[in-house]
Amino acid sequence: MVTTTAKILQKNIKRSEVIEFIKNRLKDALIGDVSITTSPVGTNILIYCMKPGLVIGTRGKTIKSLQEEVERRFGLENVQISVSEIEVPELNPEVMAQRIAQAIASGVRWRRVAFWALRRIMDAGAIGAETIISGKLTSARSRSEKFTAGFMPKSGEFAKYVRVGIAHVQLATGIYGVKVKIYPPDAPLPEQVSVSVKKEVEETGGE
C-alpha cells in the first residue's frame, strides 16, 4: 500500500522531471520558470520565457507537439500548455544564467560576459547581483570565480528573498557551471525599519 507521503513524493518527482524535460526541449527559448497545476480535468502548464515565439512555433505546431510529447512520456492526460513572456528578463536569474552559458558557448570570454550580466541586472533595478562561473577557467584544474555588485545577503531573514538560477555549458575543455543570484528591487533592505505606532486615545467623562 502506497502511503500519502510516498504519493506526494512521486508527484513531486514527476513534476521535476516534466520541468527538466521542458527546459531541455526548449533551451533556445530561455525559460525562466515553469508552473504546473493539476485539476480533475487535466494538467495546466504555464511556461515563462524570454522568447515565446520559439515555444509556440509556426501556427502553434511546436507547442502542440510538446503537449503530445509530455502526455506520452509522462502518462499525463489532457495537457494544456500556455506561454507568458518575461517582462524583465534581466531580473530573472534562470534566464541570465542561460544567457551567460550561451555567450560562453559562442566564444565570448567568461570574465567579459560575467561583468556584462552584472551590469544588465543592476541597470534593470536589482539591489544586488552575484555571478559564479566554475570550470577549467585558466588552467587544467577546475576552479570558481565570483563577481558581485550591490547588496547580496548570505544568511538570515533577507537571504530568503534572493533568487537563484543555474545553467551548464559543454566546452572542449569540459563543463562550465554558471550560477546567478539576484536580490530583486522589491526586496527589503537592512536599514528599512518598519515601525508600528499605536495611538491611544484617553476619553474622560465630565459631570
Image: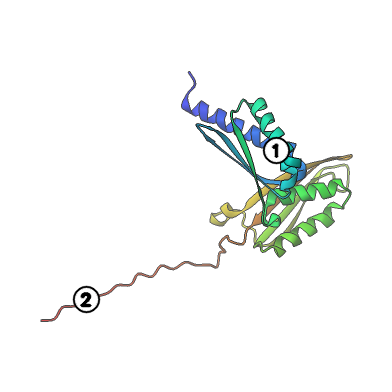
Is residue 144 visible to the viewer in this orientation of the structure? no
What is the quadrant of the C terminus in the image? Answer: bottom left
Q: Position of residue 187 (x, y in %)?
A: 57, 60
Q: Residues within 10 Å of mark 2 (few under 14, many from 20)?
A: few
CA separation in Å, label 1 and label 2: 68 Å
The residue lying at 71 percent from left, 47 percent from top is 52
Q: Quick check: 75 above or below 183?
A: above
- Snapshot quadrant of residue 91: bottom right
Instruction: Decide which of 100, 52 is in the foreground and name it.
Output: 52
The residue lying at 79 percent from left, 59 percent from top is 116
The residue lying at 83 percent from left, 50 percent from top is 103
Q: Quick check: 161 above or below 11?
A: below
| Residue that label 2 marks | 203
Q: Residues within 10 Å of mark 1 (few under 14, many from 20)?
A: many
Q: Position of residue 38 (x, y in %)?
A: 54, 35
- Snapshot quadrant of residue 19: top right
Q: Quick check: 98 above or below 15?
A: below
Q: Secondary structure at mark 1?
A: helix
Amino acid type indicated by mark 1:
Ile
Instruction: Decide which of 98, 39 is in the foreground and name it.
Output: 39
Instruction: Decide which of 68, 89 is in the foreground and name it.
Output: 68
| Residue that label 1 marks | 63
